[in-house]
Amino acid sequence: MRYSQVAVLKTADYLEGTTKQFSLLDVESRLRSAKRVLIKINLVRMPLQIKLPLTNRSPRKPAPYRYHGNRGIAYTPAIAADGDITRIKHIEALVQALQSLGVEQIAICEGACGWDTTLAYKVLGYEELGQKYGVRLVDTNWSEPTTIPVPNGKQLKDFCLAKEYLESDFRINVTTLKVHGATCVSLCLKNWAIGLPSAIRYGINRTANRIRGQGESFPIHQHYDREEIYGQGVGIAETIADVNSAIPYELGIIDGLTTIHYGKLMNLAERRNAQGKLPVYQTKLLFASFDRVAIDAVASRAMKLNPYKIYHQYLSAERGCGTIDLETIDVLGERIDDIEMKCFPMLKQRATML
C-alpha cells in the first residue's frame, strides 16, 4: 500500500521548521528539475494593525470593470488580530530554504480580494523582500489570464487564471491554520481554489459584488445554490474540488504557529459580531505535504474535526486530488494525538467535530 506523507513539526522558528520539513519530505529531490518555482500566498484581508480606510465591502451596485479597478483600495479587515493571512517571515524563510537548494527563479503570487494586492505587497514588506532576494511579485488578479478546462466539473467547465500558474515547474501553496466560514476550515485546498481565479475575468472578490470582471462571476458565496451538507455550502465545496482537480500544486504548507477558531459554537449572527475579534491560539505547528488532500485532512484531524465531514475535502479526495484516509497517511514528526486541539466551527457545522 502506498502511503502519503505529511510532515508535522512543533517549532517557533520558520527557517528551522521549513528546513526540517524539506528534509523529512526530501523536497530537494523534487526540485532538481524545477527551474521556475511559484509560491501562492494568502493576503485575502487587511491586517487589523494596518488601519487603512475601508471602502464599502458590499456595495448595492458593483462598479463596472476597469483594469486595476481596486488599486489602492481596502475592503475587508482580517478576522483576527494575527494568523488570518500569510506571514512574511514564513515566506522569507521559505525563499531562503529554496535558494539554499539552488532554486534561482522564484515568483510570489497572490490575487487578494479583500484589498488591493499591490497595496498589500507594499505595506506588508513584500516589495523589500522581493528586492532583497531577487524574487518576482505577481498580482494575479491583473496578470495575463489563460483558460483551462475542468474535466467532469460540477460547477465549472473551465476557469480563468494567471498564466504564471501554468508556466511554473513547481508550485507551492502556503496558507494558515484556521476554522472559517462556509467551508468549515480554510486550509490548502480552499486557498488554492479561491485564490487562483482572475479578477480580469471574474471581478474583485470573484463574485464581482464590488467590481465586475469582463465575464460572469465565479460560483462562490452568493452565486451558488443554498444546499448545505453538515452546514457547508455544496456549491462552494464543488467549486473547490473542481479547481483542485483541474490544476495541481506540488507542495502544500500550512502555518500553524497560531490557530484561529470561534472559541465556541457560534451561530451566524454571533460569528458576524466576532469578525476581527476571533481568538488566536498559540500552537507552534507547521504542516507540509505533496498530497493536497492529506495535508488538509491531517490539519483538520489535529483540530479535532472529521475530514470526511468537511465536504470540499471529501469531494477533492473523490476527484482524485489526494488521500483523505488517515490510515493511509504517514505522519512524520509529531503524532496527531500529541498536538490535537479542540477547535470550534460554526454552530451549524457542529457535526464535523470529533
Image: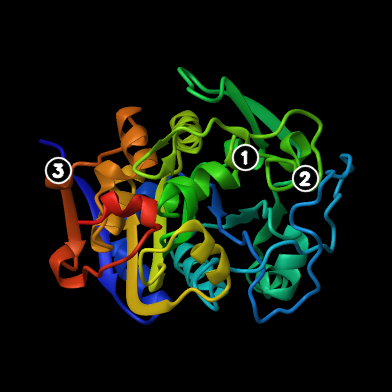
- Tell me if residue 216 comes above or below residue 354 in the rendering: above
Amino acid type, residue under disc 3 in the picture: Thr
Q: Any mark on residue 142, and which?
A: 2
- Which quarter of the rendered picture does the N terminus lie within? top left
Q: Residue at x 44, y 77 (%)?
A: 279
Mark nearer the N terminus (1 vs 3):
1
Residue labelled with disc 3? 328
- Mark toward the viewer: 2 or 1: 1
Residue labelled with disc 1? 222
Q: For mark 3, does the 10 Å Cα neighbourhood hold few (<14), some (14 to 19), or many (20 or more) residues?
A: some
- x, y percent for residue 63: 87, 45
CA gap between label 2 and label 3 equals: 40 Å
Q: For mark 1, does the 10 Å Cα neighbourhood hold few (<14), some (14 to 19), or many (20 or more) residues?
A: few
Colour convention of the picture: rainbow
The residue lying toward the viewer, choosing from 48 and 289, is 48
The residue lying toward the viewer, choosing from 201 and 142, is 201
Residue 345 in which image quadrant: bottom left
